[in-house]
Amino acid sequence: MRKILIPYASYGGGHLSAAKNIKEYIEENYEDTQVILFDYMRYINKVIDKISIKTYSEINTNIPWLWGKLYYHTQSPLFERIFSLSNKVISYKIARLFRLEKPDIIVCTHFFAGHICSILKKRGKITSKIGTVITDYGEDPYNEWITGHEFMDYIFVAHSGIKTTL
């Protein structure tokens, strides 16, 4: 039996919605396949997960222009280094889960999960195929989606505009 893990994050609902739809499609179209969804941020740390979800929701609902500014500025080299360092640190806990589950394929619907998987593959900690589903719909996807792309086996995009950009 093939095993597919789909890590997602609960920010805004889009990442979870994508994960559920992928799971449903696989289960309906592929026999002998086990699909497991898991909220990797909650798995890493429930307190940080709760705080970050609340913060995201409040900013996005009450001051959406601020979210746009934050999104834009997190594309800077400084933020990319911070994200890279934090993802390296939290990759150790995720690596334990992957060793236990032994997935054949990991399909990420959140950019941090894809980055973490690429770190683990680069270090030789996992041999699973890695796919990342870019859930951003704009023409210029967030840089974190493709950080470590050389260790990803598949990158799925919403439309040809993103494909052209990449």
Image: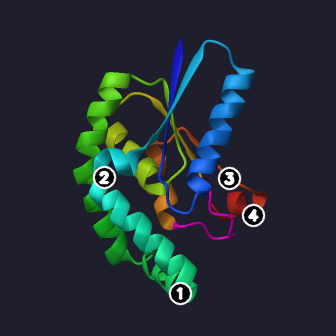
Q: Secondary structure at mark 4?
A: helix
89 horizontally vs 120: left or right:
left
- Coordinates of residue 157 in the picture (x, y in percent): 68, 53
The reply to whether the C-beta atoms of the residues labelled 2 and 3 are less than 8 Å apart is no
Residue 118 seen in render? no
Q: Amino acid at mark 3?
A: Val
Q: Secondary structure at mark 2?
A: helix
Mark 4 and mark 1: span between their CA atoms? 28 Å
Q: Amino acid at mark 1?
A: Ile
Asked if 112 appears above or below 132 in the picture, the reply is below
Mark 4 and mark 2: span between their CA atoms? 36 Å
The reply to whether the C-beta atoms of the residues labelled 4 and 2 are less than 8 Å apart is no
Mark toward the viewer: 4 or 2: 2
- Coordinates of residue 138 in the picture (x, y in percent): 68, 69
Query: In the rendered view of the protein, which quadrant contains the N terminus?
Result: top right
Q: Which residue is mark 1?
A: 63
Q: Secondary structure at mark 1?
A: loop
Q: Which residue is mark 2?
A: 46
- As for residue 53 lying within the magenta part, the answer is no
Asked if 151 appears above or below 79 in the picture, the reply is above
Task: Give the crowd class for mark 2: few <14, some 14-19, many >=20 residues within 10 Å.
Answer: few
Q: Which residue is mark 3?
A: 157
Q: Image point 68% across, 32% down: which residue? A: 24
Q: Which mark is residue 161?
A: 4
54 horizontally vs 20: left or right:
left
